[in-house]
Amino acid sequence: MSRWGLARRAFALGWRAAPVAVSVSLVLALVAGAGPAGLAYLSKLLIDALVAPSPAGARTVAGLAVATGLGAGALAVAAMLRQLAAGAAQRGLLLRSQDLLYSRVNAIGGLGPFEDPGTQDRLRLADEAATSAPTDIVDGVIDAVVGVVSVLGFVAVLLAMWPPLGVALLVAEAPALLTHLWLARRSATATESVAAPQRRQFFYRSLLTDLRAAKELRLYGTGGLLHGRAMALLRDTSGVRYAVERRETVAQAWLAVLATAVTAGVTVFVVLGVYRGRISLGDMTLYLAAVAGVQAAVRGVIFQLGRVSASLRLFRHFDELLSGPADLAQGDAELAPLHGAVRLHDVWFRYGPDGPWILRGVSLTIEHGRSLGVVGLNGAGKSTLVKLLCRFYDPQRGRITWDGVDIRDVTLASLRARIGATFQDYMTYELSAADNVGFGDVEHLPDRARIEQAAARAEIDGAVRALPRGYDTLLSRSFADGEQHGVLLSGGQWQRLALARSLMRADADLLILDEPSSGLDALAEQRIHRQLALLRQGRTSVLVSHRMAALREADEIVVLADGIVAERGAHASLMAAHGLYAELFTAQAAGFQLEASR
Ligand SMILES: Nc1ncnc2c1ncn2[C@@H]1O[C@H](COP(=O)(O)OP(=O)(O)OP(=O)(O)O)[C@@H](O)[C@H]1O
């Protein structure tokens, strides 16, 4: 999209965000622009009236003096009102652009964009743009209007009185305009070029202050190393910015020399004109005011155009992010409750076009009301299968159907609303315990009884009640709730909260548990699996686990190996087949027996 197109969109955004403030700003900009030339002309009339050979009447002089004073006062008030309107427009624009950005980020349906460095850089630039670019563009254009009107006012007065000076002043400012536009382009390019290293630097910086990283950083002494890396990146990125600033300063110094030469030339010329009686004293003040006024206004316009030009480049990232296509296309239909089965039909999947195939033609059926266990060695693709069921990615080949309907043909929201899941890399929210559980079903977040029931099923209700403020206790050491400091849970307790979260959707059609008990003690694990087995009875569920005993009761178990379903069946038949499942099960059981016999 062209710069004009982008500027139009930024203005449209501003107009929708704060129509009154933007219009008031524009009107006051016209007043502020025309004011200085008008005032200079009034001053000229006043001086001429004072020093003319036949002095004007006292009334005329007093009238001109009052008009000049009132004009100056009105301009000052207009400037203040403009500042107020600009502030209101800025606030409206900031809220609107941030709102649009958050909505867009939330509308990203899958995980792919979050794993793409290019998209991450664009997100960072769009975030930076959302904070300042639309405001800078709207403000910059309005300020440029002030400057242009101001220049036109002076030039109009000069052209009417002495045309060569008007033309000469305009021509003298052309190099400044071109130089600033070139500098603005360089500055925006520099901002873009440091986006990736800057994001990496922020990452190192956040690690240095991250509570979760603090243990390892201290034990392994990696703090200094990360500090060094962050500083090296900061040195590079700030070096790039400094180079741009240096270039700007040198260019501005040359432009200042040029402006001084023009001012000096005009001053000498005009003063000699007064000395020789060709120019009146009033004309002289007007010419000198015009030179200073035009130079200041042109410099203002140039500065604003540079600012707008740089902001437009940033705004492009914001605009492209907002208007870009959805990462996952989705149908309009709402997904109906499950009655038959969820099926994978010859599913092939890899994370990137150059990556290895993780699933190579997986077909399996998850029957309604039955439980499916998934086993496999590390990296076999079990969690990948779970992510595909939630449609965080689409398979490159094959399809996944829900009662015969391709899950790509229904809305993402309706698919996900029917699934409750605990992920292997579950989240720990630095929020209240109630939020940590209730986030599993936002609709029922205020329903404390439901939250407590889910927590009780995951055997964490008692521990939460024992916290200083029960379910309202903040689970964080980095944030405080007023005077109240938060508390931290143990790893297993966090895992139980994550499990409780997935149980909030008590009526979910499909319950997916990816290693839900890896951090639990043996007794708790046994009890929870018994609970989950009861809960899963009559419900459709997928359980991924390395704990073979937990899977034993599943209606069907599949073994993933080399990207395919290598074995399938119930526990007994798999044991009888003496394949990988039997080997894994026996190895784990033998481990326990060995321990027991010691
Ligand atoms: N987001 C990702 N981008 C690229 N590759 C990935 C991604 N997630 C997983 N992989 C790769 O896919 C393969 C399968 O990973 P997955 O997490 O599905 O295995 P898993 O069977 O759940 O393993 P584990 O038993 O260790 O949990 C691994 O080789 C992993 O490196």
Image: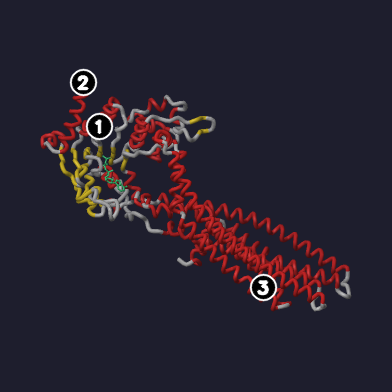
Local packing at callout 2 (Cα closer than 10 Å; few below 14, some 14-19, many 20+) is: few
Q: Quadrant of residue 33?
A: bottom right
Q: CA distance from mark 3 to mark 1?
A: 86 Å
Q: In the rendered view of the protein, which quadrant contains the N terminus?
A: bottom left
Local packing at callout 3 (Cα closer than 10 Å; few below 14, some 14-19, many 20+) is: many
Residue under pointer 3: 169
| Residue 49, position as x, y percentages in the image | 84, 71
The amino acid type of the residue labelled 3 equals Leu
Name the element at disc 2. loop
The amino acid type of the residue labelled 2 equals Arg
Q: In the rendered view of the protein, which quadrant contains the C terminus?
A: top left
Q: Which mark is residue 598?
A: 2
The amino acid type of the residue labelled 1 equals Ala
| Residue 500, position as x, y percentages in the image | 35, 33
Q: CA distance from mark 1 to mark 2?
A: 31 Å
Name the element at disc 3. helix
User: Image check: 89 left or right of 526?
Assistant: right
Depth check, front residue: 38 or 583 = 583
- Asked if one can make out residue 73 in the rendered structure from this viewpoint, the answer is yes
Local packing at callout 1 (Cα closer than 10 Å; few below 14, some 14-19, many 20+) is: some
Q: Which mark is residue 112?
A: none
Name the element at disc 1. helix
Q: Quadrant of residue 214?
A: top left
Q: Is mark 1 within 8 Å of ligand 1?
A: no
Residue under pointer 1: 533
Mark 3 and mark 2 in contact (Cβ < 8 Å)?
Answer: no
Q: Quadrant of residue 528?
A: top left
Q: Is residue 536 above or below residue 385?
A: above
